Image: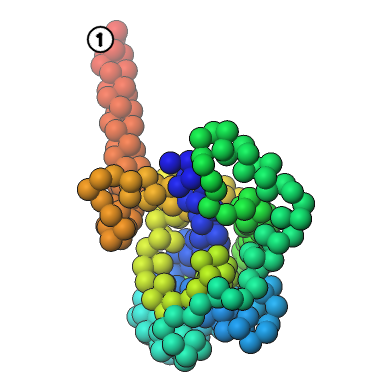
């Protein structure tokens, strides 16, 4: 159990970067962007093929994020300049990216088992410090016979994900970021202030997909392979992370909302791992589990709010009755 939870946290931190990208379009821009399912694979495909051609892992990862940014910008252009519905624009780009990703990879699956990935380099550096044995000893003392990977992946990805979170927070408080948020709230209003909403939408969708592609590039290196179908359902996972995080931690400020998204991504992976340990569920039920989680995350806050409102009305009625009896 402890081993499975460790792995869930490890992958959840990486997927949290993708969830932050989904948050930018889904919550900030109010843009239902399905490009995510394609750009996630694009990031992984570009990173994989780059490393196989001798590009250093860090640079390959950056190239993957850049490819995602370009894909997102094209979706924004299709919507703003082509005057095509936002949802349909994302679907069209997602379909196009399937073929583009196949072109990039040259085949449905690319193996990175013989490549020096970002995480393998980290593991090599970490092994020289001797700290891995120390942390593994802690887990073993808690009952785990082994650990799925070295601690360095978790530690480094926590710093990377938090750094992206703080940069996102800062960006959304800048003049451009505020204009981006205003565009999501009320396009007509921000347009009346001479802001170019088309450019803002293109930029926002591009930045969102760059984060999604960055996550895809890191996941590809983490699992040591890229597959053309690995992005299927990624938008649902991203939305689940956003909705679960907001339901549990709130969304009063940008800083709280972004940390909630990260927490939601980790909790989502943990819940999925725990659910798959139930006897009557197997790995093929993951999409069903995700759908149920999203439904619960959407419905539960409304039920709790309705109960709270009902209690408030009953309390107010009781106060009015007591006043009437007193008079």
Question: Quick one: label 1, few (<14), some, or many (20+) residues within 10 Å?
Answer: few
In the image, residue 271 sits, relative to residue 72, either above or below, namely above
Residue 278, percent from left and from top: 29, 44
Question: Which residue is at 31% across, 58% downward?
Answer: 283
Query: Visible in this render: residue 221?
Result: yes
- Identify the element where label 1 is drawn: helix
310 or 204: nearer the eye? 204
Q: How many marks?
A: 1
Looking at the image, which residue is at 51% across and 35% down? Answer: 143
Q: Furthest-front residue in view?
A: 145
Q: Residue drawn at (39%, 56%), measured in percent from left and top?
A: 240
Image quarter in which the C terminus is found: top left
Q: Is residue 173 visible?
A: no
Q: Residue furthest left?
A: 280
Viewer-side residue, 171 vs 196: 171
Q: Tell me where residue 285 appears, x and y as whole percent.
A: 27, 57
The one nearer the camera, 111 or 15, is 111
- Which corner quadrant of the image does residue 65 belong to? bottom right
Q: Quadrant of the N terminus?
A: top left
Position of 54 relative to 216 (above/below): below
Image coordinates for residue 271, horizontal then vertical, percent: 39, 47
**Residue at figure coordinates x 34%, y 38% from the top left:** 305
What residue sits right under mark 1 in the picture?
325
Does 23 sit left or right of 94 as displayed? Answer: right
Residue 108 place in picture, x, y as percent: 41, 83
Most extreme residue toward the top, as rendered?
326
User: On screen, 199 above or below 325?
Assistant: below
The colour scheme used here is rainbow
């Amino acid at each position: 159990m402890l081993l499975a939870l460790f792995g869930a946290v490890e992958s959840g931190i990486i997927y949290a970067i993708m969830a932050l990208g989904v948050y930018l379009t889904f919550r900030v821009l109010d843009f239902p962007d399905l490009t995510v399912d394609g750009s996630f694979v694009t990031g992984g495909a570009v990173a994989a093929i780059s490393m196989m051609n001798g590009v250093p892992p860090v640079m390959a990862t950056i190239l993957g994020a850049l490819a995602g940014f370009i894909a997102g910008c094209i979706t924004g252009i299709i919507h703003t300049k082509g005057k095509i519905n936002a949802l349909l624009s994302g679907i069209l780009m997602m379909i196009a990216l399937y073929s583009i990703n196949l072109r990039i990879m040259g085949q449905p699956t690319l193996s990175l088992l013989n490549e020096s990935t970002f995480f393998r380099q980290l593991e090599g550096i970490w092994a020289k410090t001797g700290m891995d044995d120390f942390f593994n000893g802690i887990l073993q003392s808690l009952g785990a016979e082994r650990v799925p990977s070295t601690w360095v992946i978790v530690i480094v990805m926590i710093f990377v994900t938090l750094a992206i979170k703080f940069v996102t927070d800062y960006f959304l408080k800048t003049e451009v970021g505020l204009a981006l948020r205003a565009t999501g709230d009320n396009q007509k209003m921000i347009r009346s202030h001479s802001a170019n909403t088309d450019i803002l939408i293109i930029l926002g969708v591009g930045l969102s997909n760059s984060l999604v592609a960055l996550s895809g590039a890191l996941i590809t290196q983490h699992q040591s392979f890229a597959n053309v179908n690995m992005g299927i359902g990624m938008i649902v996972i991203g939305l689940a992370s956003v909705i679960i995080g907001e339901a549990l931690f709130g969304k009063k400020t940008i800083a709280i909302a972004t940390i909630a998204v990260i927490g939601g991504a980790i909790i989502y992976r943990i819940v999925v791992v725990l659910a798959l340990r139930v006897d009557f569920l197997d790995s093929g039920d993951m999409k069903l589990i995700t759908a149920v989680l999203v439904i619960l995350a959407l419905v539960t806050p409304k039920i709790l709010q309705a109960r709270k409102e009902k209690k408030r009305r009953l309390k107010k009625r009781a106060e009015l009755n007591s006043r009437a009896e007193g008079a």
